[in-house]
């Protein structure tokens, strides 16, 4: 993943980015801000690991969490849209999933839901089942996937 290239694409488009992360714990924001000079593109990152944080910081509805659970496209959508509302960014990505160990028959380890919100565009959500790769690897591939979503939105 060429993070510097992603930042340059955002810079050229006049787009600021914010992140809303649960299972990645800020890894997407960290990857973006590892590049010197990224402050003109990266607005902020929300690490909303608990449901309470998702509701308080991003406006995720309790009813959505009750109906679908934190690991769902519905919550990923509300996280991405909430980050758009709570920031000065025009493009946001959200990540919520089960890094492991554990999971269930219905929400297995390695399932990660993503949201991508951009001012003036419909919000996109998707679920990727990365498999039981181990906690660190699931978090890493989820970070990389989120970065790829940002890049595709700017292409």
Image (cartoon, rainbow, N blue to C red):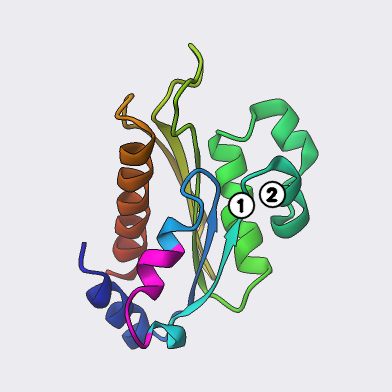
Residue 77 versus residue 43 in the image, above or below: above
Estimate the x, y position of residue 64 in percent, counting from the top left. Answer: 71, 36
Q: How crowded is mark 1: few (under 14 residues within 10 Å), some or many (20 or more)?
A: many
Say if the magenta span includes residue 2: no
Q: Which residue lies furthest to the top in this view?
A: 105
Estimate the x, y position of residue 31 in percent, counting from the top left. Answer: 36, 65
| Nearer to us in this view, 69 or 117 | 69
Say if the magenta span includes residue 35: yes
Disc 2 secondary structure class: helix
**Residue lying at 69% horizontally and 57% vertically, measured from the top left:** 58
Drawn side of residue 106 relative to residue 11, left or right: right
Estimate the x, y position of residue 104 in percent, counting from the top left. Answer: 51, 15
Drawn side of residue 152 relative to residue 44, left or right: left
Which circle's residue, 1 or 2, is located before the other in the chain? 2
Q: In which quarter of the image is the C terminus?
A: bottom left
> Which disc, if any, is residue 55?
none
Residue stretch rendered in magenta on the structure: 29-37
The part of the image, by quadrant, that contains residue 81 is bottom right
**Residue lying at 44% horizontally and 34% vertically, measured from the top left:** 99
The part of the image, by quadrant, that contains residue 135 is top left
User: Mark 1 against mark 2, which lies toward the viewer?
Assistant: 2
Distance from Cα at disc 1 to Cα at disc 2: 7 Å
Q: What residue sits right under mark 2 in the picture?
A: 54
Q: In which quarter of the image is the N terminus?
A: bottom left
Q: How crowded is mark 2: few (under 14 residues within 10 Å), some or many (20 or more)?
A: many
**Residue lying at 60% horizontally and 39% vertically, measured from the top left:** 74
**Residue lying at 39% horizontally and 29% vertically, measured from the top left:** 110
Marks 1,2: beta carbons within 8 A: yes
The image shows a total of numbered marks equal to 2
Residue 26 versus residue 33 in the image, above or below: above
> Which disc, if any, is residue 79?
1
């Amino acid at each position: 993943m060429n993070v510097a290239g992603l930042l340059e694409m955002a810079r050229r488009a006049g787009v600021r980015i914010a992140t809303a992360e649960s299972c990645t714990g800020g890894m997407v924001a960290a990857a973006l801000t590892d590049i010197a000079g990224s402050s003109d593109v990266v607005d902020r990152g929300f690490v909303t690991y608990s449901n309470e944080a998702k509701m308080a910081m991003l406006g995720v509805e309790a009813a959505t969490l009750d109906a679908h659970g934190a690991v769902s496209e519905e919550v990923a959508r509300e996280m991405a849209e909430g980050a758009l509302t709570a920031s000065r960014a025009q493009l946001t990505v959200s990540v919520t999933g089960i890094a492991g160990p554990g999971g269930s028959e219905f929400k297995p380890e390695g399932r990660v839901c993503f949201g991508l919100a951009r001012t003036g565009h419909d919000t996109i959500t998707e679920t990727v089942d990365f498999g039981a790769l181990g906690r660190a690897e699931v978090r890493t591939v989820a970070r990389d996937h989120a970065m790829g979503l940002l890049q595709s939105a700017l292409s």
